[in-house]
Image (cartoon, grey):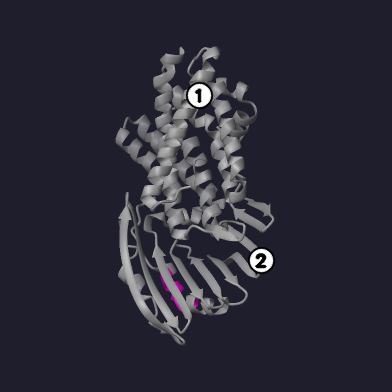
Amino acid sequence: MQLVQRAQDILFKPKDTWPQIAAEAATPQSLYRDWVLILAAVPAVAGFVGLSVMGVGGFGFSYRVPIVSGLVHMVFSYLLSLGMVYLLALLVNALAPSFGGTPDRLAALKLVAYGSTAGFAGGVFQLLPSLSALGLLCGVYSIYLVYLGLPVLMRTPPEKSAGYTAVVVVAGIVAGLVVGAVSGAVLGGWSSGRPDGGAVTIQSPGGDVTLDTSKMEAAAKRMEALGKRMEEAQAKGDSAAAGKALGDMMGAMAGATGGAKPMPAADLKALLPEGFGDFKRSSVEAQSGGAMGIQSSSARARYGNGDKAVSLDITDMGSLAGMAGLAGWAHMTLDKETDGRVERVFKQGDRTVREEYRKDGSRAEMTVLLPNGVIVEAKGDQVGIEQLRGIINGVDLNKLATAARPPS
């Protein structure tokens, strides 16, 4: 099955496509491998880029979710979305007899997985938060897709499909609220292409954003290889190996394949200089921890020189490092200038750099994403961007980029 062709068919020819889907041989594993794992990544990745790179602004106010928090939220929202698809399928199956349908777990999973196509694909509008309302319209179209699919997949009498759909929609809204609540609780109170690996450019009033989607293609290829491994295990009757392969496919999308551990926090702390120029270090700290199996380590130092202040952070997301590369801003370019404020995202060799600063030198921020997923970030008050660049370059970035992580 060609993913792009199937997406086009279900979106533009749903009445002809649902019978084909109903007749196809499939398993829960193959539905996740070939469809859900890939499409569910669209809103998660786009949401990260929109909130943590582009930011939300209007009426003189702007807000951007910190990069590290954005990465963690992206992974949690992605994994919770995968679970929500399965739970909704169970509900669709359980409700079938109440609406004159025939219970069939596989058919219910097909219905939810393919019926969610418009909603998942519409997640791309989260790249620009000002366009996120268009994603809601795509969600409405997914409701229509489910409505058309119920009589075919669950054999529901057409006259009862509207009521059946309404109940499923209400359940989906409740599930979405639960996902948001869980995500917000974990992260401290906030929640929110082209398949050939080419570039996608989005034009906005604030500037053009160019995204390189090659990482998504690479992840798809990894999943294809893992899918073959899972099929071989199923053919041999090895359910344990098949289950592990499915977990590895989820890891391939989350960047957690291999379960890499972060560098020791003490090692990161040792890379923070005691001072630079006339700036003296006033505090330094290092910490490590994890939640739900996601480990990270970080170190932070603060420096001062009269009314000038700088904070310097080094963060290693460990098992999320691969997701950082997939997340989009690692392969994104941006050049924007408004009201004396400049914002740029650009490549510097194999590193990705984001700069935001005011031309009057009152405020500057600079973030460097290294190829291994380690993030170095500096923020300064009453400090210009040139000085902040010197501070970042004072950290041994080459050592950070080539340092080996502890074995899992």
Residue 301 in percent (x, y) is at 38, 74
Circle 1: element type: helix
Displayed quadrant of residue 234: top left
- Residue 395 falls inside the magenta stretch: yes
Name the amino acid, label 2: Glu
Q: Nearer the viewer, residue 188 or 52?
A: 188
The residue under the point 57% across, 38% down is 136
Residue 265 in percent (x, y) is at 32, 67
Q: Residues within 10 Å of mark 1 (few under 14, many from 20)?
A: few
**Sequence-wise first label, 1 or 2:** 1
Where is the C terminus found, in terms of image quarters? bottom left
Q: Nearer the viewer, residue 395 or 93?
A: 93
Where is the N terminus found, in terms of image quarters? top right
Q: What's the distance in space between the residues labelled 1 and 2, CA to CA?
A: 46 Å
- Would you name the residue on which mark 2 appears? 337
Q: Is residue 244 left or right of residue 144?
A: left
Residue ranking furthest to the bottom: 278
**Secondary structure, magenta segment, majority class:** helix
- Would you name the residue on which mark 1 appears? 166
Residue 59 in percent (x, y) is at 62, 57
Name the amino acid, label 1: Ala
Residue range highlighted in magenta: 393-400
Circle 2: element type: strand
